[in-house]
Image (cartoon, helix red, strand yellow):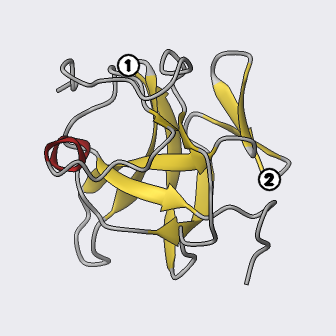
Amino acid sequence: MAGSFFVSCTDEADSPLATYEPTQPGAGDMSLLQGEFHLEDGCAYVKAQRHPDDPELSYYLPLFPDEEVQLLDGDALEYNDTRYQNGDPIDLGGGGPRHTLDEAIADDALPENSSISEDCRGDARMFTVASEARYGSS
């Protein structure tokens, strides 16, 4: 289900990569999202288990720091000098509230200066990826 009602926050909302402009080291790195990178239906996701005992995969919408990620060849991304293609395992440090995209829009909880394609699933859970380049990793 796409969030066709989504209002873009920047001119880059046509990119399948959801991004934000870090303004402080508040994105956090208390959580680790481990799963598989997938680019599908015009949006980049991580498919991961919500709980270790639950075999069903959930969609997570990683919100990447804008200057630390790029789309390559239209079907891969580069993050922290590593290339990821569909199905590749990916580990992301970050956190934030685990709203779905629909909930974040309804609660006005999207980060300022964020860019998210209107093609992204409204039921995907948001995950703010911690900025490594500007604030370092812990």
The picture places residue 29, in percent across and down from the top left corner, at 57, 76
Instruction: Give the image location of residue 137, x and y in percent.
Output: 75, 76
Amino acid carrying mark 1 in the image:
Asp
On the image, numbered disc 2 is attached to which residue? Answer: 80
Q: Is the residue 8 above or below the residue 46 in the image?
A: above
**Residue at (17% x, 27% y) in the render:** 1
Q: Earlier in the sequence, mark 1 or mark 2?
A: 1
In percent of width and height, residue 42 lies at: 43, 19
Quadrant where the C terminus lies?
A: bottom right
Task: Indicate left or right for 23 with 109 as reference.
Answer: right
Identify the residue under disc 1.
41
Q: Which mark is residue 75?
A: none
Spatial CA distance of label 1 from label 2 is 24 Å
From the viewer's perspective, tell me whether residue 74 is left or right of residue 49: right
Give the crowd class for mark 1: few <14, some 14-19, many >=20 residues within 10 Å: few
Mark 2 secondary-structure assignment: loop
Judged from the image, the secondary structure of the residue bearing numbered disc 1 is: loop
State the residue in front, 36 or 28: 28
